[in-house]
Image (cartoon, rainbow, N blue to C red):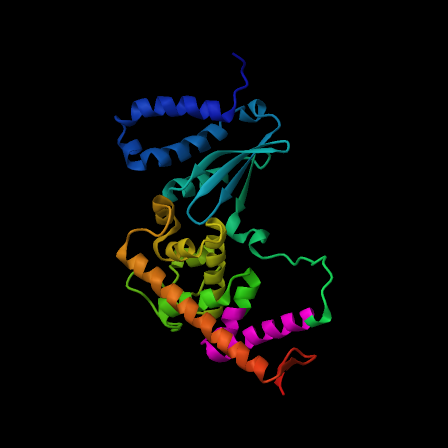
Amino acid sequence: MTRKRSLVDAVSVRLAKLRQKSTASPLLRLLGGRGAAALLLGATLSLGGIAETLEGVHFLVQKNLDSVRVLRQNGSRSTVVADVRDSFASNSLFKLSRALPGSLVSRQIALFDSRWVPATTLDQKPRSVFHEEMTRINNAIREQFFANAIPYGDLIHEKSVKYDVDPALVAAVIEQESRFHSRARSQVGARGLMQLMPRTGRWLGARDLYDPEQNVDAGVKYIKFLQERFDGDMKKTIAAYNAGQGNVDRYNGVPPFAETQTYVKRVLRNYNKRNEQLKHYSNEMKSGGATLDADGSLTLR
């Protein structure tokens, strides 16, 4: 047997030994299997001489809100060697990774990665002047609708454009969460327009959840994160906003909780209502002969 063994083999051997002792250890019973695995992985990576046995291998520890993935990178190949979705275990693993040398392990907080902010792309297809003008008018009408018809609509539209999220969905969530009251606070401590918990707010960059700008920015960013997490599935996204992504994963859809099922129905109802209002507003503007001035403002003829 060679001295060079992969990380996966090393962890497997240690986990086997750990399981034999787990029933007799109060600490391991307290941590649980996933917590112990996280601590073990950190300990394994920090073993003396591990850099020699993993020559040419690098690990990337990716932290989402309540989960951690560890990718083993060898040249152009990347392999997921751990996917920890338990909140305690994932936080423990990410904290342990900070103590490891940068030559072996790097870290990435996905919520703040640049990919969450949509990049500007160029349309290579030629577009007619008419198409360009109609696109500008439609965008201006949408922006004006939210600014005039929805409380905090200008802020909702601005943040939705920033993170490439449908502003009608954001408005629907806020309507259900706080009825557009910026000082709203739930019995469990959720705060502000989008009723974010302080811990979630901090992860999303918001320090004052009663500040509408910080609250909406963080809430829209969270919706974008959930949309990416659930491949754009609107029902799963809405359910996860209410019940947590772990419960949506567990039930592979809207969890069988009366509160969450009612919540999803009401948000979808709000969403459809706002889209109908936007459609009616757009038709009225266009029938009145709306044109877009050079400064971006709409004029009715």
Magenta span: helix, strand or loop, mainly?
A: helix
Residue 190: quarter of image: bottom left
Q: Position of residue 79 (x, y in %)?
A: 54, 33
Relative placement, left or right, of 127 versus 16 is right
Pick the front one: 96 or 268: 268
Relative placement, left or right, of 224 versus 23 is right
Q: Position of residue 183 (x, y in %)?
A: 37, 72
Which residue, as the protein is rendered here, is positioned at the far front?
287
Which residue, as the protein is rendered here, is positioned at the far bottom?
301
Residue 196: quarter of image: bottom left
Q: Position of residue 128 (x, y in %)?
A: 72, 68
Magenta stretch: includes residue 272: no
Residue drawn at x 46%, y 65% as measured from the top left: 170
Relative placement, left or right, of 263 versus 60 is left
Residue 58: quarter of image: top right
Start and end of the magenta stretch? 131-157
Which residue, as the protein is rendered here, is positioned at the far top?
1
Number of marks in picture: 0
Residue drawn at x 28%, y 63% as measured from the top left: 187
Can residue 97 be seen from the camera position used here? yes
Can residue 46 be seen from the camera position used here? no
Compared with residue 224, is residue 37 higher up or lower down, i.e. above or below?
above
Which part of the image, by quadrant, shows the C terminus? bottom right
Compared with residue 292, is residue 233 higher up or lower down, i.e. above or below?
above
Compared with residue 124, is residue 142 higher up or lower down, i.e. above or below?
below
Q: Position of residue 52 (x, y in %)?
A: 58, 23
Residue drawn at x 63%, y 80% as measured from the top left: 297
Pick the front one: 126 or 202: 126
Magenta stretch: includes residue 140: yes
